[in-house]
Image: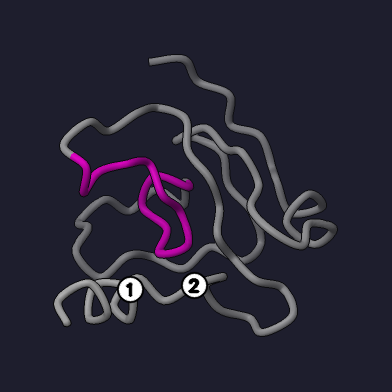
Amino acid sequence: MAFSNVDRTKEVEKEQGVVRIKSTDHCHYYEKHPDTFLQRKECWTCIYSDFGINTGNPSDTGVCEYNKDTNRLSHNPLSDSKEQRR
């Protein structure tokens, strides 16, 4: 696993969509995922990150889905899964 440990705050503030990230990156908008026990403030453990964990093929690179305009996720994965079940 390559360590980059880059502060992505400025990229997250500028973007309208998603920001490409590494698992060890971080930013000012970090919010710990409730299912993690790790104490490091890295993208890997942030609620706004997507590293393909639910696909069964996780990666060290992913995307940040923080929406600066609404201060929340760009999309709601729970809503997506409810729509797919209908």
Q: How is the image coloured?
A: one colour
Q: Which residues are magenta?
A: 43-55
Q: Quadrant of the C terminus?
A: bottom left
- Whole-percent x, y for residue 82 in the image: 22, 81
Q: Nearer the viewer, mark 2 or mark 1?
A: 1
Query: From what the image shows, is residue 53 above or below residue 35?
Result: above
Query: From what the image shows, is residue 83 above or below residue 36?
Result: below
Front one among 24 and 54: 54
Q: What residue do we see at 40% from left, 27% from top?
A: 60
Q: CA distance from mark 2 to mark 1?
A: 8 Å
Mark 2 nearby-residue class (10 Å; few <14, some 14–19, many ≥20) = few
Q: Which residue in the rendered view is the most extreme toward the front?
A: 86
Front one among 40 and 33: 33
Which residue is disc 2 drawn over?
Answer: 75
Q: Quadrant of the N terminus?
A: top left
Q: Name the amino acid type tagged 2.
A: His
Mark 1 nearby-residue class (10 Å; few <14, some 14–19, many ≥20) = few
